[in-house]
Image: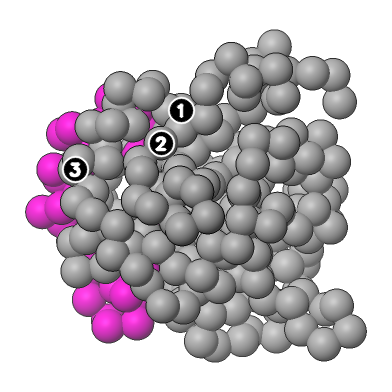
Amino acid sequence: MLMPRVMPCLLLKNGSLVKTVKFKNPEYIGDPINAVRIYNEKEVDELIFLDITATIDKREPPYKVLSEIASECFMPVTYGGGVRDLETIRRVLSLGVEKVSINSHAAENPEFVKAAAERFGSSTIVVSMDIRKKMFGRYEVVIYGGRKGMGLDPVEFASVMEKMGAGEILLTAIDRDGTQEGYDIDLIKSVTSSVSIPVIACGGAGRIDDFGLAVKDGGASACAAGSMVVYFGRNRAVLINYPDRDKLEAILCQEK
């Protein structure tokens, strides 16, 4: 039995690593290359890097930083941020990045996902869905770093993205981001039950048991973590880390 993947989801801003809480107040963490070297030693499954201001600032991805990251990484890398055309995807992939994540442009122009999947293959295209909980418990897809609501239901949008050819969905609950209070299992389950492609749960991981809940109760194929893998202790001291693999296996490889 293959163990579900557990991957750090790392945020970039101006070439540096930062961490947010509910998509706000980015706090400086350090140099991404140093983090990559530590994660290499810890043999993590994959890495996700998201530039949180590229789309908002209407600029291209940080190609130089990505080139350095890809050349240092021993594991697959996914990159997202500022991806709005096929040439950008081609250029990112040419650096050695394995997957490209599309967020805002996927919601604004779903046909772009289809074009990207046809050109580069579904296994290369990840659709990143940022979700905010509205009044009466309703969920909504939001874009531009949580600044713009699209009026889209996550379940319906995920189904459309699968039909467009997305190979994977990165599902982030904004209200859980950086809180370490656990994943939004209801959100995860609603999406995983509506699509057949892998769903990566993101937003809220605080302890190793959260991964088990996201997989067993939520149906996630993989889990992403931010604060849990860059902070330590109540005072949130910066410490690039990763859960012990034996403990992960014990939690994730039990029968559902």
Q: Relative to 136, is 142 on the left or the right?
A: left
Q: Is residue 62 left or right of residue 107?
A: left
Residue 91 appears in the figure: no
Q: Which residue is mark 1?
A: 45
Q: Secondary structure at mark 3?
A: helix
Does residue 65 sit above or below 24 in this rendering?
Answer: above
Q: How far across and down, in percent of the image, does residue 130 sit?
A: 59, 68
x 33%, y 31%: residue: 39
Q: Secondary structure at mark 2?
A: loop
Measured in 3D between alpha carbons, the distance from the residue under mark 3 to the one under mark 2, in whole angstroms, is 14 Å
Question: Image quadrant for the C terminus?
Answer: top right
* Residue kind at label 1, given as amino acid type: Asp
| Residue 222: % across, % down | 62, 37
**Who comes first in sequence, dot 1 or dot 3?**
3
Magenta highlight on residue 55? yes
Give the magenta part as a residue range.
50-79
Q: Residue at x 20, y 41 (%)?
A: 34
Residue at which label 2 appears? 241
Query: In this figure, which residue is indicated by the disc labeled 3?
Result: 33
Question: Which residue is nearer to you in this view: 253 or 107?
Answer: 253
What amino acid type is highlighted by mark number 3? Ile
Task: Classify residue 152 by image quadrant.
Answer: bottom right
In the rendered view, tell whether residue 133 sits above or below residue 62: below
Q: Mark 2 against mark 1, which lies toward the viewer?
A: 2
Q: Position of residue 131 (x, y in %)?
A: 65, 70
